[in-house]
Amino acid sequence: MSEKPLYPSIIQELLHQKELLQQEYEYEKAEFCKQTESAGLIRKIHKGICWFPLQIGRSYYNSLNQFVVEIYRTDKTEINHAFEFGRPIRFFQQHFDGRIVFFNFTAIVSYAEENRLVAILPQVAHLAELENKDNLGVQLFFDETSYKAMFEALADVIQAKNNRLSQLRDIILSKQSPIDREIYPIRFPWLNQSQENAVNKVLCAKDVAVVHGPPGTGKTTTMVEAIYETLHRETQVLVCAQSNTAVDWIAEKLVDRGVPVLRIGNPTKVNDKMLSFTYERQFENHSLYAELWSIRKSIRECTGSLRKKSHSEKEKIRNRLVHLRERSVELEIRINEDLFANARVVASTLIGSNHRVLTGRYFSTLFIDEAAQALEAACWVAIRKANRVILAGDHCQLPPTIKCVTAARQGLSHTLMEKICLRNPSVVTLLNIQYRMHRDIMRFSSRWFYNGELQAASEVSDRGILDMDYPIMWIDTSDLEFHEDFISETAGRINKNEAGLLLQELQQYISKIGYERIMDEKIDIGIISPYKAQVQYIRSLLKKNTFFKPYRSIITVNTVDGFQGQEKDIIFISLVRANEHGNIGFLNDLRRMNVAITRARMKLIILGDTHTLNKHTFYRKLMEYIDSLKSN
């Protein structure tokens, strides 16, 4: 008997997605307005959504003929901010009586780094409003752009008929078996068997393929090889990911292989190597750009002089402007065509694939990395531009960030990759050899999330730091009467005693290894907690403790999300929760815990209250597994 579909039709399923996305949009907008309107200035600064005070720097026209201004954060704090390419911002001034007054225009972030950003102003005149003003600040404005792109994409997919998009939609969202192309299998001696199988699966796929990459299995290596090999058969491909960081990571690996990459959308933090591959930088470096820049300057000068001229002179200037603008458009088109003609890979975020420079462009293959962290609607934004789709990621790790709990529960958290893996497993290749962890650290995750299919590569299987040492330890805090405290909805909870104990244990473990060995072997350490408040508290304790001063450069403290894609020799995890009722809240998200426990290469130490946590099967089984290692 066939399984009853979740929705009566694919179209109704997509309509349901649209409704859930609308819920998320309305919820996020309401929450953003609540935070920005009710929160005080100091709180907004600490949330990373506001810079104050700031200094206005130089202004100029960028290569895309946008008028931009540089802004500097004068209060150079260590607070991470949320300003990044494409996000809307509003300037404000704090008056002497403390009132905050916003300027009546919205700018767009063109580039952002730690204490400097470049903002695109809608009009040149707005600069005069900002100059010579005291107590200036800038704040993130609610971003409609990504939602607009996703709603448009869903509408296109729903309405698609008798075209490639409608075919891909029906194949991806149904149990219809995709068609494979007949290609003789290629050997890749530098890849393991599962990686080789995955690359060949990608090359054979006519419609869709999925590379399922658990922690440490070389997903990026496999994707780069698949893209490189695809380019032997196709002229150009589109490579996307959910985040700028992921796009830059895979783009950099392709550049290392000698692949010409055109990076669309300025990355938030880009190194010098990748900067030269951005659309803007390549546009500026084109041989015709000097002429274009000169023409644009003439257009601005002519436009500015119109008001001062007589009627006859105005006519001459207008005629000149017509010719200048025609030449400007002609040069822009020629530069644009050259940039795309020279690129083998066009790289952007999923939402960035909606950039105006990609309007009307179509690609033989779309590769989506981090597919398991992307909303389904975001994937459709890019899929509209492709003839076939290759997704890579791991739906057993971090899910998409969804703020509306109701929308998440009703299905918004189910990603396109997850649906394909569930409905059409024949298109999925699991990478099953991991090169990161000691086999005992790997084994529990493998059993719980990957049906026990993961294997540890021989070179990492038994490696450790100290002799006669267990790769995993659980430090039970239940008899120490520690307790958790609620801080806020955004910061979560804190357990100060557990944080203190963690640093004691870390100090002891560092002392056992010894300073010289740690520095000689470059042993690095990560401290993870699911809660921001605990992370911030542990960071503050580290700064105060003089013992850790020589080791600060090798110790990273962050949330689970902050550790996605990272690995360390030693990992400490503070689970925080300690209460009489067994409430574990955020720890119920087992995909996040999978990320946390698979960051360690050689040593994993978990601190947690067993009385609170053993009511949940996952944590109880994890404790039992760790205990079993001692008896073996």
Image (cartoon, helix red, strand yellow):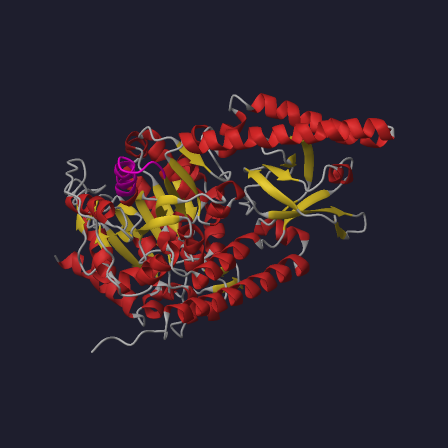
In the rendered view, would you say 267 is above or below 310?
below
Q: Please indicate whether residue 152 sits to the left or right of residue 578 in the image.
A: right
Q: Residue at x 81, y 47 (%)?
A: 96
Q: Main secondary structure of the magenta part?
A: helix
Q: Position of residue 466 (x, y in %)?
A: 22, 42
Can residue 70 be spotted in the picture? no
Q: Residue at x 26, y 41 (%)?
A: 226
Q: Position of residue 144 (x, y in %)?
A: 58, 55
> Which residue is at the front of the view, 536 or 49?
49
Farthest residue toward the left? 632
**Count of marks, rendered view:** 0
Q: Please indicate whether residue 30 sits to the left or right of residue 231 in the image.
A: right
> Which residue is at the front of the view, 610 or 324?
324
Specify the segment rendered in magenta: 221-236
Q: Position of residue 15 (x, y in %)?
A: 45, 68
Position of the N terminus, as image quadrant, is bottom left
Whether the magenta-drawn stretch holds residue 223 is answered as: yes
| Image quadrant in which you'd find residue 63 | top right
Q: Residue at x 51, y 38 (%)?
A: 266
| Image quadrant in which you'd find residue 240 | top left
Q: Position of residue 222 (x, y in %)?
A: 26, 42
Q: Please indicate whether residue 490 sits to the left or right of residue 233 in the image.
A: right
Position of the C terminus, as image quadrant, is bottom left
In the rendered view, would you say 254 is above or below 181?
above
Can residue 422 be spotted in the picture? yes
